[in-house]
Image: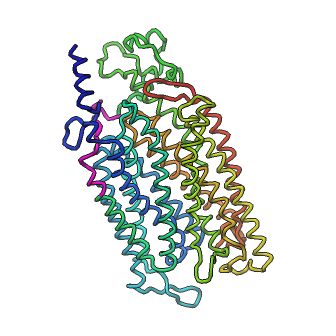
Amino acid sequence: MEESNDVLLEDELGLVDGAVDYSGQPAVRSKSGYWKSAWFIIGVEVAERVSHFGIQGNLISFLIGPLKQSTATAAENVNIWAGTASLLPLFGAFIADSFLGCYRTIIIASLIYILGLSLLTLSAMLPSLVKSKCQVDSTFIFCSPHSQVILFFISLYLVAIGQSGHKPCVQAFGADQFDDKHPKELIARGSFFNWWYFTMVAVCSATILVLTYIQDNYSWVLGFGIPCVVMIIGLIVFLLGTMTYRFNIKVNDKSPFLRIGRVFVAAVKKRRNTLSSPSIEEESGGIVLCQGSKQFNFLNKALLAPEGSEEDETCTLNEVEEAKAILRLIPIWATCLVYGIVFAQVFTFFTKQGKSMERTIFPGFDIPPASLQTITDLAIVLISPVYDRIFVPVARSLTGIPSGITMLQRIGTGIFLSIFTVIVAALVEIKRLKTAQEYELVDDPNAIVPMSICWLVPQYFLFGISEVFTMVGLQEFFYDQVPNELRSMGLALYLSIVGVGSFLSGFLISMIENITGKDGHESWFCDNINKAHLDYFYWLLTGLSVVGFTLFIYFSKSYVYNHKGIITQA
């Protein structure tokens, strides 16, 4: 009777189970969370995306231009930075999930981000303050001073550190504003990831168009300074929403990393013990193991209690299932890495291709090569509503699945489309090289090939469509499939696919550069793009993508979904 009265009181007050407000009091549904809180959080994420793409979108042009780096070196530096920025969120998520929580981590990360952007703007000012000369052969030319290069890379990696706390926490904190135990809010959270990505991309499209034009035609100082101002405004907006936020209460005082880690340790210690279904039922308090426990049976040994051991030394069934949930993600994560390699080309060699092509729209106006990245964003903006409003309902009527198709089917569709992206890129590059030969421009590294930059539109648009499926699918998948207390880490794992992909791309470029550039031969990535062979590189990526897609299908077929303690076959 007392329990039913508590339920009635909760319904009457509209309290959110497991959440408190900014003052530590139980969160009231009508005054906290939901879309009214999500918009403040989206505000700071919009600012971060403006800042991120204001740097990454045209970074290769700054390295090749003001910093005078070679094409291969610049591409490697972009890949290394992008990879670092996408891997560091694993550290940021660990700090948030174990110690600070999402809210505090976002504030600290934003301050570091603003410091990095401020120093980046200062580094762009240095050439006008300090003149430096470098010797090339027997002549001296003006080049970037060492102080500018050092300050630039310090500030660039400060931005990456800021992103480490920002990227995994903001989206997780936004999704936490929706109560998955409330029917209306659960449905709203289902659309949150689609519209989150849609909003980010719409903003990024405008950012890349405006900032790359400013950077290429007016000033790098202004081009880096604007993101800094936007980030400051974003932090202020986030803080203004503090009184509306919901903060999750920790159910277990133990760190989720320690809980999961001790399962593996216990399983290794008890590896010689005999495992039988009846003993597990007994140790689990009469709970019969669910279907998911049939995978990774060796971890079930962590449930066994040695004679004379205390209760705290034995892992619980829930802890074992959390460890299995993490283990099941590894093959999916690994087989998506090739997609991360293809993703890295959008910001490097796709841009380099455009720089050598005819970019004049009308006299006096040339399209900045990096601005074609907005074609990818345009595809996402156009396809996302179609996916959410048309594709999902139609697919739902055919499959009976609420989301139309499963998360892994969505991810796999995007990976499949990315194969055609690199095929198209290879064919366009073959056409560009033939045009350069026909007009005898091969020996001129600065030549503009009489071939419209619009030829690159299909590869950008195709990749944008693939992002609607793969990137959004990965966000939802890794947020949904990790234990509740590790949702920041789940999103960090999604981001790490892009990060590791960037590192692998840099490794491939470096290895191919060394192999193909031996004995005085022109490498695939020589500074004169008209003598380079990006088409060979794209065909190599096509082959790798086919292998990666095949492995993804293989592991997806045996994947077991975990939904709120109910484990289902993929």
- The answer to whether residue 71 shows anywhere in this view is yes
| Magenta span includes 240 | yes
Figure check: 38 above or below 409: below
From the top left corner, tell me how far across and down residue 112 is, in percent. Answer: 32, 60
Would you identify the image quadrant in which residue 118 lies?
bottom left
Q: Nearer the viewer, residue 210 or 66?
A: 210
Residue 96 in percent (x, y) is at: 33, 45
Residue lying at 40% horizontally and 31% vertically, measured from the top left: 183
Q: Depth check: give the residue in front, 88 or 265.
A: 88
Percent x, y of residue 85: 45, 56
At 52% from the left and 63% from the top, the residue drawn is: 78
Vertical arrangement, residue 282 with respect to residue 417, above or below: above
User: 57 above or below 263?
Assistant: below
Q: Horizontal placement of 153 versus 377: left or right? A: left
The answer, for residue 331, to whether it is visible in the render is: no
| Side (left or right) of 15 relative to 140 | left
In this view, 485 is above or below 272: below
Residue at point 29%, 30% (across, down): 17
* x and y percentages locating residue 307 in the rendered image: 34, 12
The quadrant of the picture occupied by the N terminus is top left
**Of the pair 566 and 207, the residue shown nearer to us:** 207
Q: Which residues are magenta?
A: 237-256
In the current view of this chain or complex, which residue is farthest to the bottom?
139
Quadrant containing the C terminus in the rendered view: top right
Q: How is the image coloured?
A: rainbow
Residue 442 lies left or right of residue 156; in this view the side is: right
In the image, residue 188 lies in the stretch drawn in magenta = no
